[in-house]
Image (spheres, rainbow, N blue to C red):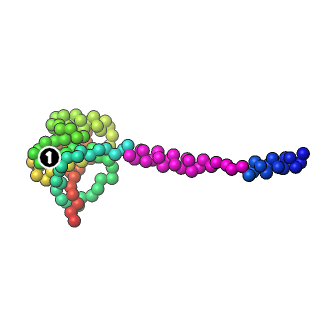
Amino acid sequence: MGNLEANALRRRAEEPQISIAPLIDMMFILLIFFLVAASFERQAALEVERPRAATATPSRTTPLSVVIKRDGSVFFRGERTDCASLRYAVSEALKGAEREVIVVADKGAPVGRLVDVLDACRLGGAKRLSIAAEEER
């Protein structure tokens, strides 16, 4: 009986074992990937020629963006809007969150329209407002 027990123990020790540590690592990597991918907000695919600035720095967060085209038309989340509707849309999008709002204005856009948009965003509850610019090279 002693040999049978020893053989049984040897067989158990020699059986291949599946380690789940790499599986757990892959699950965490996939989770991080999907969280990061889901947090990207689609930028409006509108052609805007941004002004250049020597002090332009990239944003560290995912901001809400408002686009002002050369003709003065305003877009929020890819849809055309006016300043009154923009105020409501910004307040709904923020809902108490501390997100940055970036105004992407064409360098030929009317300055008065830019001021109106900044004012509507501020009245909508935006505390952190920026104007997008291209980095000077």
- Residue visible at 40% across and 47% down in the picture: 36
Q: Is residue 91 magenta?
A: no
Q: Residue at x 43, y 48 (%)?
A: 33
The question of residue 18 being in magenta is answered with yes
Residue lying at the far right in this picture: please name it.
1
Evaluate whether residue 119 shows in this view. Answer: no
| Dot 1 alpha-carbon crowd within 10 angstroms: few under 14, some 14 to 19, many 20 or more | many
Q: Using the image as rendered, state which of residue 98 and residue 41 is in the foreground.
A: 41
**Residue 39 visible to the viewer:** yes
Which quarter of the figure has residue 113?
Answer: top left
Tell me the magenta residue range: 15-37
Residue 103 at what x, y percent from top left?
A: 21, 47
- The residue shown at (18%, 59%) is 52
Q: What is the secondary structure assignment of the residue under circle 1?
A: loop
Residue 133 appears in which quarter of the rendering? bottom left
Look at the image and tell me in which quarter the C terminus lies.
bottom left
List the single residue furthest toward the bottom.
137
Question: What secondary structure characterizes most of the magenta part?
Answer: helix
19 to the left or right of 27 = right
The residue that label 1 is drawn on is: 69
Q: Residue at x 79, y 51 (%)?
A: 10
Q: Would you say 39 lies left or right of 49 here?
A: right
Q: Considering depth in this image, is 28 or 55 the residue closer to the camera?
A: 28
Q: Quadrant of the N terminus?
A: top right
State whether residue 45 is above or below residue 89.
below
Type of amino acid under label 1 = Lys
6 horizontally vs 50: left or right: right
Q: Position of residue 95 (x, y in %)?
A: 31, 36
Residue 110, horizontal then vertical, whole percent: 9, 48
Please name whichever residue, 54 or 122, is drawn nearer the observer in this view of the structure. Answer: 54
